[in-house]
């Protein structure tokens, strides 16, 4: 099996705490890494995520990043058409360095591919709540979600286009990757407490969409401009939302409807036939996300035609968030799937991981690179990583991506090379 790329993410604080060449030495020696990328806009999340303390960092035990800061230079003129402006680190050890330049300089010197990632959120959500609450997605009752921005808001759409454009325009990178949050998918509906069997996961997730977003005024205007009867859609979805959120103490007049629904064997198709507004809502969001991806893609190509736009999938059901791979395929150059089954007990022999990769593959086609991520973090073991790579060797991936260096150990990293040798996997020259 021939693959093109083995990538590893790095954070700015990784590079501040440990010399980048020392990091790259380990990644190349143990995992044959030929691609590194900076998580240059990172959401608020304790690092390392899945263990108490760092395993590789020589200076600190753990780190709490600022929310959605940019760790490299940007041209503020790119953002003149939006109220949202990039925010930069205010921490002394990070604020005076362009960390993307640090990474790309090393990559060029070492003959590696270089990239940047714009992660889940791209703007400080607390700041947005205080200063620009209108940019946040809203649920069916008009309540904002704290960390989901509405791409149908003109300021948000322009900011998202500009941050990709400017990153590509002003830095020497080969690809730009994102796992930005799309439409809020809500919370899967749970089975009533007295019903012992678990709810069908797909039906439960589909029902949960009505508790997500977005139902803001910008979405209303956009939907009407597309020919949808938005008020009729919201009316029918409000009826369904009232049912799926009912309890014996809240909306109890429809509680029996909820209990019989969750106890039944109704299929997703049956639900969509019963509530055609739900299908229209999903279709509307698909069209919005496809338009967003098109705008970002065209901005990237305007800045530098040869830079690759890579989507980093983190969603179990991306179609519920508005992402249809067949629809967005013309506006993506590659996809990374960030399933980290390796850091948990593997009970399905990687069937879920394989299924997700094949779902993406049939969407984007057979000519665009598909990278499979796996966890090199303490809850994994070398044996699990080797088993995972064996499974990946059967589904036609074009590369691997490590998740993530900051929580790895050298033994876990070395399992990558061990698996490649064992299963005859080679990097293309």
Image (cartoon, helix red, strand yellow):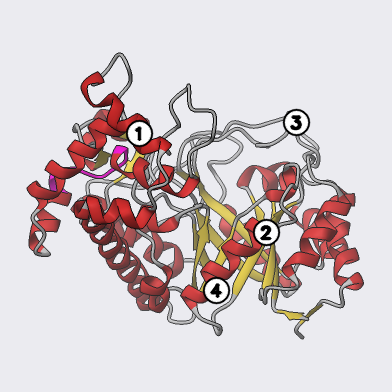
Query: CA gap, disc 3 to disc 1?
Result: 46 Å
**Where is residue 202 shown, x and y percent of the image?**
46, 49
Please, what secondary structure does the residue beneath circle 2 have? helix
Residue under numbered circle 3: 53
Q: Is residue 26 visible?
A: no
Q: Which residues are magenta?
A: 211-218
Of the two numbered discs 4 and 2 in the rendering, the one whose residue sits closer to the viewer: 2
Location of residue 350 in the rendering, given as x and y in whole percent from the top left corner:
71, 57
Image point (32%, 16%), residue name: 248
Mark sitting earlier along the chain (3/1): 3
- Say which mark, if any, is on residue 260: 1
Q: Quadrant of residue 290?
A: bottom left
Nearer to us in this view, 411 or 143: 143
Q: Nearer the viewer, mark 3 or mark 1?
A: 1
Give the main secondary structure, helix, strand or loop, of the magenta stretch: loop
Residue tagged by mark 2?
A: 351
How far is the residue under mark 2 from the one under mark 1?
Answer: 31 Å
Helix, strand or loop status at disc 1: helix
Say which element carries label 3. Answer: loop
Disc 2 versus disc 3: nearer the observer: 2
How many residues crowd around disc 1 within 10 Å: few (fewer than 14), some, or many (20 or more)?
Answer: few
Q: 153 or 137, which is in the foreground?
A: 137
The residue shown at (23%, 59%) is: 284
Residue 366 seen by the camera = yes
Quarter placement of the C terminus = bottom right
- Tell me which residue sits at (33%, 60%) in the image: 162
Rounded to the nearest whole Å, what is the CA distance between mark 4 and mark 3? 36 Å
Position of 322 with respect to 120 (left or right) is left
Eye-nearest disc, 2 or 1: 1
Relative depth, front residue between 359 and 314: 359
């Amino acid at each position: 099996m021939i693959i093109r790329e083995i990538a590893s993410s790095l954070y700015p604080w990784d590079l501040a705490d440990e010399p980048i060449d020392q990091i790259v030495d380990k990644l190349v020696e143990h995992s044959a890494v030929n691609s590194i990328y900076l998580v240059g806009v990172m959401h608020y999340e304790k690092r390392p995520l899945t263990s108490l303390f760092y395993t590789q960092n020589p200076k600190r035990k753990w780190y709490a990043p600022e929310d959605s800061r940019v760790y490299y230079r940007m041209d503020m003129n790119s953002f003149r058409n939006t109220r949202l402006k990039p925010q930069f680190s205010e921490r002394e050890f990070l604020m005076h360095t362009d960390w993307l330049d640090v990474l790309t300089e090393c990559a060029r010197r070492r003959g590696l591919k270089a990239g940047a990632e714009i992660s889940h959120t791209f703007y400080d959500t607390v700041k947005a709540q205080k200063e620009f609450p209108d940019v946040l997605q809203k649920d069916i009752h008009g309540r904002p979600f704290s960390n989901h921005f509405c791409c149908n808001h003109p300021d948000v759409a322009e900011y998202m286009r500009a941050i990709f454009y400017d990153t590509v325009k002003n830095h020497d990178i080969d690809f730009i990757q994102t796992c930005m949050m799309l439409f809020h998918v809500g919370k899967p509906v749970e089975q009533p407490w007295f019903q012992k069997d678990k709810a069908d996961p797909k039906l439960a997730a589909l029902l949960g969409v009505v508790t997500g977003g977005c139902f803001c005024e910008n979405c209303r205007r956009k939907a009407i401009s597309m020919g949808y009867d938005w008020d009729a859609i919201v009316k029918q979805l409000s009826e369904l939302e009232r049912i799926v959120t009912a309890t014996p103490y809240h909306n109890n007049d429809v509680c029996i409807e909820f209990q019989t629904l969750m106890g039944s064997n109704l299929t997703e198709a049956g639900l969509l036939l019963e509530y055609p507004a739900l299908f229209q809502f999903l279709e509307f969001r698909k069209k919005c996300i496809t338009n967003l991806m098109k705008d970002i893609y065209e901005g990237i190509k305007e800045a530098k035609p040869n830079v690759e736009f890579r989507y980093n999938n983190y969603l179990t059901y991306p179609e519920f968030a508005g992402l249809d791979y067949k629809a967005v395929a013309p506006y993506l150059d590659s996809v990374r799937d960030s399933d980290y089954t390796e850091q948990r007990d593997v009970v399905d022999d990687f069937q879920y991981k394989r299924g997700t990769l094949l779902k993406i593959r049939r969407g984007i086609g057979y000519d665009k690179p598909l990278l499979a991520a796996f966890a090199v973090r303490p809850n994994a073991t070398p044996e699990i990583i080797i088993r995972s790579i064996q499974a990946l060797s059967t589904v036609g991936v074009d590369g691997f991506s490590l998740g993530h260096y900051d929580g790895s150990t050298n033994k876990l990293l070395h399992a990558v090379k061990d698996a490649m040798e064992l299963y005859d996997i080679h990097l293309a020259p």
